[in-house]
Structures are given as C-alpha cells and as structure tokens.
C-alpha cells in the first residue's frame, strides 16, 4: 500500500510518500519547504502569510515528493492530510489540495490530527532505541508517549494503536511555546527552540549563574506548567536589562531555562512510567528535536526504568513533516471496516478543517 501525506498546519509545506509492506512502513520521499526565514522577520508565524506561501508551494512540493519516490498518481492508494489542529488559513491550503487530488485521482482521503501524526513519526522506518534496535512494528504496548510540541505538552498512555488516554498535560503554555516566548524575551529571534538549544551549549565559560524554578515538579498529578518559568526569565531580565547585551548572560539563561524544562519533563515521565508500567516510552513533537532532552531522557529511563526502551523519532521526523501524517493515515485506514473505507472516497467534499481538533481514539462503528 502506498500513502501520500500532506501537511500544512503551521509554517512548513510538507509532502511525503510512505510505502507499507507487510505492516512495515518505509519512507520513499519526505519533502519539506520551510517558511521559517519568512516568519522570523515578524517574530512568529503570520497565518495569512503562511497560507500564501503554502498556496504557492503545495503542488510543487507534492510533485517533488511523488517524483522523489518514483511513483505516479495511479500508484497512490490513500491520501492523508492534516486537518487540525493548527492555523485555519494554513490548514485549508493542504486540505483543499488533498481534496482536489482525491477528486481528480479518485482516491480515498483521510484527515489526520497533527499530534497523532507526531506520535506515528515513531512508527516510520527503523527506530533506534538505546537498548535494542526495533523495527517500527516492534513497538510494544502499552506505550507512554511524551508529546512536546509548539502547541501541546501531554503525557499520553496508549494501550493499543490509535487509543489515547491523556494522563497529564500543560495547564498553560506548551513546552515549545515556552521556548519561543523565552527566546523573544532574550531578544534571540524565532523559532526559539533551536536558537535556545544552540546558545545553551555555548556557556561553558559563563560568569553568570542563574537559577530558575522547576514548576509543578512536586505536584501530585502528571500535569505541567511553563508560563511561570517564562515569567521568571522575564523577571531576571527586568532586574538587569543591560545584561541582555551580554552573550554570557543570555547563554546562561538559555541553558538554565532549557534544563528547567527538561528536568520537569523527565521527572513527570518517569513518575508516570512507574505508575502505569508501559512497555515502551516514546517522545513526539518538535521539542523532541532537542539534543539535550533526547540524551537526558534516554539516560534517565536507562537508569530508572531498566528494561523499557525509549523510542525517539529521527530528527527529520521530530519536526513537522508529512511522513508522520502518512504513517498515521495508514494505521487509521488499516483498522477501518470496509464500509468506512468506502466512505473515504467522498471525503473530497466532506472533510473539514478544525483549528482546535481534538484527538479521538479510534472506535470501530457499532454496526460492524
Ligand atoms: O511539532 P512542531 O514542529 O510544531 C507544532 O506541532 O507545534 O514544534 C514546534 C516547536 C516550536 O515551539 C519550536 O521552538 C520547538 O518545537 N523546537 C525545539 C527545538 N526544535 C524545535 N524546542 C527545543 N529544542 C529544539 N531543538
Ligand atoms: Zn508539529
């Protein structure tokens, strides 16, 4: 089975072709056109500007991904597109492109939740873990997944495929959002995550010592809060605005902020793992591209949860991409009864976008 994935929920226009053979997924092409440079001038993503760029790029990007995969439209068995959550003007471009192709090519079309896509990035290709090399379909359930992106921070328990129980989440800002806001406070530009991560490695000789709180680390639940951390950085900066000119200050602040986020994420993940006894721990979302987080969570799980593999997507599948959307599309499709599969052929007129789409566990219709 061959799946075409399309993703335009934020500032990347992405298309990918994923092939399934005997339940294993391999990526034939993964094309991403990033708008980061365009939006960095404005300090964040401007929705209408994003839509204009998506419109210009979406069909060329799809064409490149088809050519790169060496497939023709006839070879495609399913089109999967992100239909939420995200920026509506941006989502509309990808979904409308997918609807057009579904109509013209007479292919089934499935809408995918962006975060479900991030989770399924872990089921693409060969996934490496600290202790064992496992194939994508070798991931064992229950899975405890730490989702850390620009809009979401959640601990999700998956007892099986497409089954999600949110056991904890942020009460305010998402982890990625906190990285972006703190970068803005420190005058570092957009997107904050990669800039802070780079700067954080730079402060070996820093004279500055800063200490930030670890919000909610001792709370009894599995929830998070990052907005106070951002305010604590702002407070430090307000005390001494001159310090912003000092690279050592911003580097020390970046490092301490990053460590505070990592400490809380790891502590809560391990605590949840001890309660729920998962067979696999997974990371998903843009912040999972953070090298320190990747390294430290692997170490912590290795030390405290000895026999549980920690699975993290490869860098190119951590950030927004369409291979993850195609992968999620495959798992949704393959679990559907035939009657539901047939309905996907009329999705070219029915599929809706939703800025606040909720991630729903997959349920087989009652009549089936
Ligand atoms: O998953 P993603 O690409 O988009 C959403 O679904 O939101 O995540 C984007 C977020 C941004 O907030 C960005 O600053 C953050 O992920 N991010 C990082 C890193 N790379 C991207 N955060 C920390 N360290 C990184 N290396
Ligand atoms: Zn994302």
Image: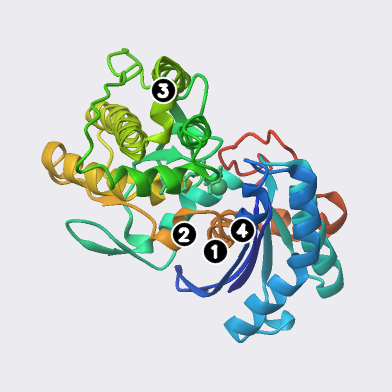
Q: Which mark is residue 188?
A: none
First of labels 3, 4 by sequence position: 3
Query: Residue drawn 69% across and 33% down?
Result: 356
Q: Which mark is residue 233?
A: 3
Task: Classify mark 1 as within 8 Å of ligand 2 or not, answering yes or no.
Answer: no
Could you tell me which secondary element the residue under label 4 belongs to? Answer: helix
Q: Which mark is residue 333?
A: 4
Q: Nearer the viewer, mark 1 or mark 2?
A: 2
Could you tell me which secondary element the residue under label 1 belongs to? Answer: helix
Asked if residue 322 shows in the view, the reply is yes
Q: Which mark is residue 317?
A: 2
Question: Whole-percent x and y of residue 178?
Answer: 48, 31
Numbered circles on residues, count? 4
Q: Nearer the viewer, residue 35 or 14?
A: 35
First of labels 2, 3 by sequence position: 3
Question: Whole-percent x and y of residue 241?
Answer: 45, 23
Could you tell me which secondary element the residue under label 3 belongs to? Answer: helix
């Amino acid at each position: 089975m061959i799946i075409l994935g399309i993703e335009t929920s934020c500032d990347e226009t992405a298309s990918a072709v994923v092939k399934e053979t005997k339940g294993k997924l391999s990526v034939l092409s993964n094309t991403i056109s990033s708008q980061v440079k365009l939006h960095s001038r404005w300090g964040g993503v401007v929705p209408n500007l994003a839509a204009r760029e998506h419109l210009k790029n979406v069909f060329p990007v799809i064409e490149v991904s088809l050519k790169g995969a060496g497939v023709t439209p006839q070879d495609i068995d399913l089109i999967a597109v992100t239909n939420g959550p995200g920026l509506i003007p941006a989502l509309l471009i990808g979904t409308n492109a997918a609807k057009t192709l579904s109509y013209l090519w007479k292919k089934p079309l499935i809408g995918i939740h962006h975060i479900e896509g991030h989770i399924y990035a872990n089921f693409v290709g060969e996934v490496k873990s600290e202790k064992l090399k496992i194939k994508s379909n070798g991931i064992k359930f229950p899975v405890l997944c730490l989702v850390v992106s620009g809009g979401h921070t959640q601990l999700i328990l998956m007892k099986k495929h497409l089954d999600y129980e949110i056991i904890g989440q942020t009460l305010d800002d998402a982890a990625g959002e906190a990285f972006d806001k703190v970068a803005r406070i420190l005058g570092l530009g957009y997107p904050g995550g990669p800039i802070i991560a780079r700067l954080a490695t730079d402060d070996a000789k820093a004279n500055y010592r800063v200490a930030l709180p670890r919000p909610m680390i001792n709370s009894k639940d599995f929830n998070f809060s990052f907005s106070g951390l951002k305010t604590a950085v702002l407070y430090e900066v307000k005390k001494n605005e001159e310090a912003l000119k000092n690279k050592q200050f911003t580097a020390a602040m970046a490092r301490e902020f990053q460590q505070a986020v990592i400490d809380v994420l790891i502590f809560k993940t391990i605590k949840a793992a001890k309660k729920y006894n998962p067979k696999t721990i997974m990371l998903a979302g843009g912040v999972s591209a953070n090298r320190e987080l990747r390294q430290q969570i692997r170490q912590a799980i290795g030390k405290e949860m000895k026999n549980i593999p920690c699975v993290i997507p490869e860098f190119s599948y951590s950030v927004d991409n369409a291979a993850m959307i195609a992968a999620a599309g495959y798992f949704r499709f393959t679990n559907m009864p035939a009657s539901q599969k047939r309905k996907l052929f009329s999705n070219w007129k029915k599929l809706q976008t939703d800025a606040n789409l909720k991630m729903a566990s997959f349920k087989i219709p009652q009549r089936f």
